[in-house]
Structures are given as C-alpha cells and as structure tokens.
Image (cartoon, helix red, strand yellow):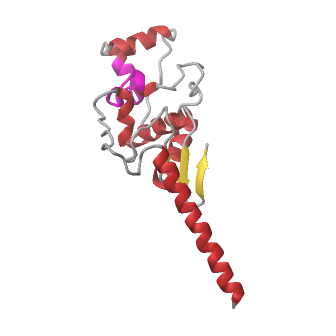
Amino acid sequence: MATNSTGFALSAGMAAIVVLLGYTLLNAVSLVGFASQPAAKHDVTETPSDTVAGWCGTPSLYPSRAILSAADAAVVDAGDALFKGNCAQCHAVNDKVVGPALAGITRRRPIAWLIPWVKNSSKMVAGGDAYAVKLFEEYQKQQMPSFNLTDEEIMAIIAYVASQEGGMAIASAEGVVVD
C-alpha cells in the first residue's frame, strides 16, 4: 500500500512542477500573471506583422518567444508540410533561393496582400500592383506559379514561416518543447 501512495505523491508532485513551469513560461511572455497595469491589447490593424495574430487565436509575439497551444502547433505542423510541398522548391525562410527569403514577410506585406499573391501572383503583376511588379522585375521576371490553396492553408504556411524566424516554445501534451 505504501508503494501506491508514494507513486501517487510523486505523480502529484511532478504534475505541480509542470503546472508551475507552464505558469512561469506564460508569465515570462506576459500571457498570464498579475500586473499593475493591464496588458496592451494586440491590434491586428496596426502593423502588417500583427496580422498573424489571428491564425489560431494566439497573439503574435515574435520576434520575442511565443507559447503555442497544441492546436496552434498543429497549424504550424500543417504549414510545415504545405511549405515543403509547395514553397520550398523556390523559397527558404532565411535565405534567398529562386524567390525571396520569407522571414519577415508579414512585416513587408499585410496578410490581405499575401493571400491573393500566393493564389495568383500573375494577376497581381498584370493588375499593376507596385510591389508585385517590383518583385517580378527583381527576380528576372520569374513568375511564381499560382497555388490552389485555401486562405487557412496560406495562413498555416505563414504561421510556419513565423515559427522558423526565432525560437518558439510549443505547449503539447508531453510538456513544453522549445524549438
């Protein structure tokens, strides 16, 4: 009987440590805790980089560290697969390949511009969009292919790219994993 109670005490103690560690990490990035002033509200209309805030309900915190829920981690994983299947032939996150490096893409262009660009860049170039034409000219008139991706799939790719720009902590059932 003593073995069962010792095992239970050890399990409860480890659970308490995991909860305290999680709270400490969340407090470190100001997602929880007690502050003398209320936390600033994220406004997705202020800057293009903040538009990533809606990808799964997690506020965009990069370039600082972010804590992702298991659902957000699944979105990033889906974005990873989509990136490798559709984008990696011409793009890398931090290096210029055939096309530009995608790190910081949401600081350069808003999501409302990126989604139609990924779906049909030729249409945007033909329509005279100044930034689209600039990219087209800069990359020796190399046309990016059109992709039949949903808005959610494009957002998943953007979430993956954002996750690769800096270290992120991912909360999962196994605990907190730091990339």
Q: Is residue 9 left or right of residue 131?
A: right
Looking at the rendered image, the quarter that the N terminus falls into is bottom right
Q: Residue furthest bottom?
A: 1
- Does the magenta-highlighted stretch encompass residue 20? no
Would residue 151 be seen by someone viewing this image from the given angle? no
Magenta stretch bounds:
107-124
What residue sits 37% from the left and 14% below the top?
Answer: 131
What residue sits 52% from the left and 19% below the top?
Answer: 100
- Does the magenta-highlighted stretch encompass residue 123? yes
73 or 59: nearer the eye?
59
Instruction: Tally the marks.
Output: 0
What residue sits 61% from the left and 70% below the top?
Answer: 13
Looking at the rendered image, the quarter that the C terminus falls into is top right
- Residue 96: x and y in percent read 58, 19
Would residue 13 be seen by someone viewing this image from the given angle? yes
- Residue 167: x and y in percent read 58, 37
What residue sits 34% from the left and 15% below the top?
Answer: 126
Q: Vertical placement of 149 versus 32: above or below? A: above
Q: Is residue 67 left or right of residue 14?
A: left
Q: Is residue 119 left or right of residue 12?
A: left
Q: Vertical placement of 173 versus 111: above or below? A: below
134 or 47: nearer the eye?
47
